[in-house]
């Protein structure tokens, strides 16, 4: 699936949440989508957990 199509689908889901559940439902769904995307990237191996941990603890810079 192309990034444009994925972005459109995400927009549809967030618009549905805003219309049916108000701003609270919209924000909660956006948060869960972000967490799900992060977990998916971790499982795919696209995010190196060790370097991320080192950057947050100050052992190594992120640049």
Image (cartoon, helix red, strand yellow):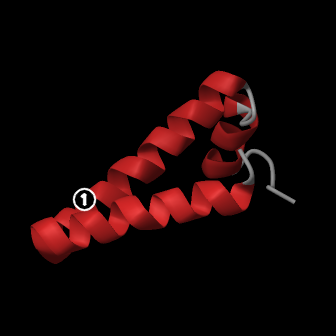
Lateral position of residue 57 relative to residue 32, left or right? right
Q: Residue at 36% across / 59% down in the picture?
A: 13
Q: Residue at x 68, y 42 (%)?
A: 52
Q: Is residue 60 left or right of residue 16?
A: right
The reply, left or right, for residue 61 in relation to residue 39 is right
Q: Which quarter of the figure has residue 54?
A: top right
Q: Which residue is disc 1 drawn over? A: 28
What is the x, y in percent for residue 17?
24, 64
Q: Position of residue 26 (x, y in %)?
A: 25, 67
- In front: 14, or 57? 14
7 on left or right of 48: left
Residue 35: image location, x then y, percent:
43, 45
| Residue situated in front as seen by the camera: 12 or 42 | 12
Residue nearest the viewer, comparing 62 with 47 = 47
Of the 4 image quadrants, the one containing the C terminus is bottom right
Quarter the N terminus occupies: top right
In what element is the residue under mark 1? helix
């Amino acid at each position: 699936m192309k990034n444009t199509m994925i972005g459109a689908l995400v927009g549809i889901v967030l618009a549905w949440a805003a219309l049916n559940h108000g701003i609270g439902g919209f924000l909660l769904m956006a948060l869960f989508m972000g967490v799900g995307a992060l977990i998916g990237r971790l499982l795919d191996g696209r995010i190196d957990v060790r370097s991320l941990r080192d950057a947050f603890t100050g052992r190594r810079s992120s640049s």
